[in-house]
Amino acid sequence: MLIDRRLLRNLDYALLGAVAIAVLFGCAMIYSATRWNIRLTAGNPFLYVKKQLVAVALGAAGSLVILTVDYHYLERFSKWIYVISLVLLASVFVLGTRTKGAMSWIRIGSLAIQPSEYVKIGVVVALAAYLSEQDDLSDLRSFIVPALIVAAPMGLVVAQNDLGSALVLAPVFFAMMYAAGADTKLLLTIVGAIILVIAPLSYVFLLQPHQQMRIKVFFNPGLDPRGFGYNVTQSVIAIGSGGLFGKGYGQSTQARLNFLPEHHTDFIFSVIAEELGFFGATAALAVLFFIVHRGYSIAQEARDRFGALLVVGLTSVMLVHVFVNAGMTMNVSPCTGIPLPFFSAGGSSLMSMMISIAIVQNVYMRRKKIIF
Amino acid sequence: MMNRRRTRSDRRLRVFQIFALCLFAVLAGRLWQLQIIKGDYYERRATANRLALVPISAPRGIITDRHGEILATSRMAYTISAVPQEFSDREAEVQLLSELLEMPVEEIEAKIAGQTEGRYGVPYVPARLIEDAPPHILVRVSEHRVELPGVIIEEEPYRSYPCGTLAGPIIGYVGLINQEELASFAERGYRSRDRIGKSGIEREYEQYLRGQDGVTEVEVDSLSRPVATVGAEAPVAGYTLVLTLDGNVQKTAENALQEQLAKLQSGKYKGAKAGAAVALDPRTGEIIAMATEPGFDPGWFVPRISDERWRQVSTGVSGLFNRAVSGAYPPGSIFKPFTAMAALEAGVADLTETVLCSPSVSSRYFRKRCAIWSSGRTHGRQNLTEGMINSCNIVFYELGGRLTADQMASAAKNFGLSYPTGLRFTPMEASGAVPDSSVRKFMPGELASYAIGQQVTVTPLQMAVAYGGIATRGLIHRPHLVRDAISADGSVVEQFAPEIMRTAVLSERTWDYLHDSLSQVPRVGTAAYAFQGFGIPVAGKTGTAEVPPGDPHGWFVGWAPVDDPEIVVAVLIERGGGGGSAAAPVARRIMEAYFHSPDR
């Protein structure tokens, strides 16, 4: 027996159930969104569901392995994990392929992995390990090392032209700093400075024209409804036209007739809202909220500081993904290529989320000394 | 120490829960806003996204003569079109098409691009390559259907005129709607590629003839490729119009005009190239025949007229000019009945008095002459009746001297001259001119020429209507060309009933005089030769209107039978010479055709 039975008894089954519901819900919507699109599925309506289920199986296997290992090993090997993450990320420059302008994939045979999805976990582990050692985070100097830990992978992801994925790490950094006890005033000052000073400056000096356009379109989707504003415009139409009860499962017009692009990946939430209406969409949000809620609860119950910070970090990654993705479909947040956790089609995203959940469960299982 | 840190950490982790809840509330709130509050709006946007409406042309209404003979109808034409999204191998298919259609590849590509690409492109509407494709090309394309998945053959109603030039200028023609028409007809649902009546009945009764286009609702994807047909509404054909025209009489009128013009041209009158004839029923105003030469075949305009044909009908003696309704000509002697009635009603002339017609009296009439003098003869002493029968100018110069311009003008206007007759037709009829003292002052010499119809202008239609008024002793009907409008389901939508436009009041003595004198014209007067042996009593008047330089216009207007008028005919031959020789024979043939018709 690889895992102790008593450890298994201590799993958070409510969290496990919520994740299972989210993944199955996602598969059902992926099927609905792709089965019409012969160009995408090459005649096999279950193609994307199959791919998703393979990722589930791989993710489950990985999760089992993680559950057997005490999460404190992560702390012990955090430096190695961090370095491997950076190397993996850097390897994209050598081995990577380019999709939709962003170079973030590595192809190994027929398998394509997106290192940036996994690197988020590595960064959280490293940051949690570092912060768990720090008692005093009250002055600016104490922010330097944790900021660098996050900035290095962020820089690499930005260099791969995937600004959206990189920026996800910023709120996660602040969340973990806050959880680690950083001075609130200092944190707020830094966040304020970023929003009011650094963001506008970098918009003007650092962003490329197409990235600037994304931001402009966020504030005014009608600016370029056939170009940069197209996705969001069509997504808002899809969601709005769903109404209270939706058009019915498989009955979307925006997705089926291809007005809504990327409807099985980035815009799966729009398909849910169009086909299942307000009820279906809030149900999906409720499941995701429950997962996040359980995550932060587990952080509270963690046996030690490293466990708590680890779980806060991983949960925050999920929260940011959910908000940025679902927000994007409704023009609440700018358009980025960030998937909806557990729902969007895509192996790397799903597996990294399952691994994150496994780590959270790991922390939960070992919240107290196992009584023999 | 450890405990304090734990509680602080706990408090901070609770902040995370609240923060997460807030973010989810924002998302749920936005969902509510989009789906519940603005749901209807976005549903409309989604529907507009996915549904495209492809119109199906409705056939135009049929036009028949009074006996039901079809003058205009619709036939099915086949249009070969391309749907570029459906090409499997565009280059090869366009190449094959080019061979089958005998059309260069560049032309095909240009036509496809024009319809489906660019800012105004409508990709789900097929690009039309050949309209009204000839049968041999249709067969060739059909044989290669399998190799040409991107090519479709569409059926479309086209106008067809089985009788060719018969009544062509009356029926008018149909053409593509132009920008101005589109602007004024847009609210009635016309679109930029619609066909619309351009002249004649086709234009005047456009609203009746135009059917209700059908529509196919097509679901399209984001690239505007048709995915499925969602709904369809069948087109409804336009109304059938039953004209008052009698096809046989019409045909005779046109033939008689053509033959007469040919005869005159081959003889003395080289300039006799155009003419018009109107035959109507004075009891109702129904137009039995209306001919104008030269004419045209409305079929020349389907689907569009060739440049060569267009030059032919639009330049020189134009076939597009309807002389019967739009041509205003000096009437010459056919005006004399109005002068006579003015004199009799004013009491300035007496039926018993006589006037001497002789060159010796010319000085009394401003050196004006009587037409007969050129042959070396004179009319001698004439009373008013003889003056009418022989069309003696001297008699009417005398009357003109006793009358004012206003008196003659009002007699003519009483019968509708100078006013539109009220015929519904496009283009709008000419109204001619009957000037009086309000227009200008007339010198005595001009009054003399006024009396013989040289100071006014009239249309052949006006003359037919006015003489109809003389024939019926004062009832002047509005002339009309359409009897009934019948809808596609066979019910009569509208009947065009006879309508009295005006009544002319004259004394019985004057009516008797007019009927007596005019009925002798075809018997013993200026039209006697033309009506020799005609079995039915005819009343009428010839006219020879001077239009220097060149030969005069020849006129004849008359009705039959004299006492029970059924038909009034007005004939004008431009530059045809004397009315008795140029116009009267045409009128006789029209009357013959009418009275020989078994079901007149």
Image (tube, coloured by chain):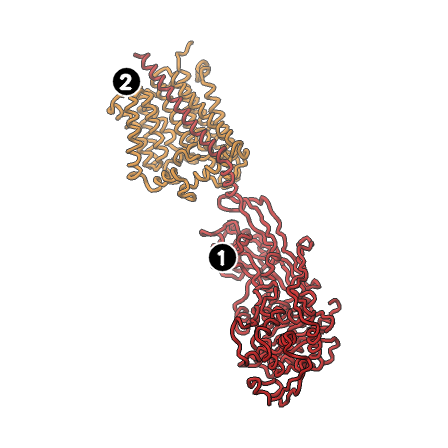
Chain colours: A orange, B red
Residue B6 x %, y %: 34, 14
Q: Quadrant of the N terminus of chain A?
A: top left
Residue of label 2: A135
Chain of residue at mark 1: B
Q: Is residue B556 visible?
A: no
Local crowd at mark 1 within 10 Å, few (<14), some, or many (≥20)? Answer: some
Under mark 1, the amino acid is Lys
User: Which amino acid, mark 2?
Assistant: Asp
Marked residue chain, label 2: A
Please rate how many residues cluster around mark 2, counting C-alpha atoms within 10 Å: few if below 14, some from 14 to 19, many from 20: few
Is residue A338 visible in the rendered image? The answer is yes
Query: What kind of element bears circle 1?
Result: helix
Residue B48 pos. (x, y %): 51, 43
Q: Quadrant of residue B326?
A: bottom right
The residue closer to the viewer here, A42 or B277, is B277
**Residue A371 falls left or right of residue B137:** left
In the image, is residue B322 above or below residue A126?
below
Q: If the image is split into quadrants, where does the C terminus of chain A sit? A: top left
Horizontal side of residue B468 vs B26, given as left or right: right
Q: Residue at x 61, y 75 (%)?
A: B572
Residue position marked by numbered label 1 in the rendering: B111
Residue A9 place in picture, x, y as percent: 46, 15
Label 2 element class: loop
Whole-angstrom CA distance, mark 1 to mark 2, is: 76 Å
Q: From the viewer's side, name the closer residue of B580 and B250.
A: B580
Q: In this view, which residue lies farthest toward the left? A: A141
